[in-house]
């Protein structure tokens, strides 16, 4: 369903996006770099969609995805710190 929201994909374009996403994940795993499969496939769908007709890509949705990529790590760090301090406050053995 992700491809339907970003751009209209034909089966061959979906195949290309899935294949490039899989290759990216395999290479990242081989190098020991953690990658998100969701982020990878979203980027691949935008890439395939922009090669056929860049005006058909819903760039507002793609922009929101990029913003979520940027916000995810610091927000996760803040939530983790908050949980740590909450547990430390509840249980003094930390």
Image (tube, rainbow, N blue to C red):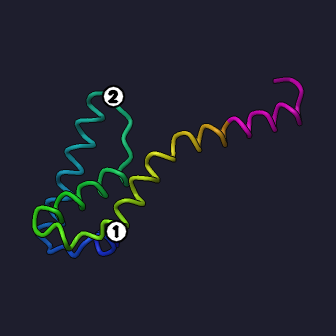
On-image quarter of the C terminus:
top right
Residue 65 point in image, percent of width and height:
40, 58
At x 38%, y 46%, the residue is 36
At x 74%, y 40%, the residue is 83
Q: Residues within 10 Å of mark 1 (few under 14, many from 20)?
A: few
Residue 48 point in image, percent of width and height:
16, 61
* Helix, strand or loop under label 2: loop
Q: Quadrant of residue 12?
A: bottom left
* Helix, strand or loop under label 1: helix
In reply to whether residue 85 is colored magenta, the answer given is yes
Say which residue label 1 marks. Answer: 2
Secondary structure mostly taken by the magenta-highlighted segment of the chain = helix
Marks 1, 2: nearer the viewer: 1
Q: Which mark is residue 32?
A: 2
On-image quarter of the N terminus:
bottom left
**In the rendered image, the vertical position of residue 81 relative to residue 23, given as above or below:** above
Side (left or right) of 63 relative to 80 = left
């Amino acid at each position: 369903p992700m491809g339907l929201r970003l751009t209209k994909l034909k089966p061959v374009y979906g195949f290309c996006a899935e294949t490039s996403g899989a290759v990216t994940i395999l290479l990242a795993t081989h190098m020991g770099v953690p990658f998100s499969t969701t982020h990878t496939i979203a980027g691949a769908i935008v890439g395939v969609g922009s090669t056929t007709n860049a005006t058909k890509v819903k760039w507002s949705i793609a922009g929101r995805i990029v913003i979520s990529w940027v916000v995810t790590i610091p927000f996760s760090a803040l939530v983790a710190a908050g949980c740590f301090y909450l547990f430390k406050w509840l249980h003094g053995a930390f």
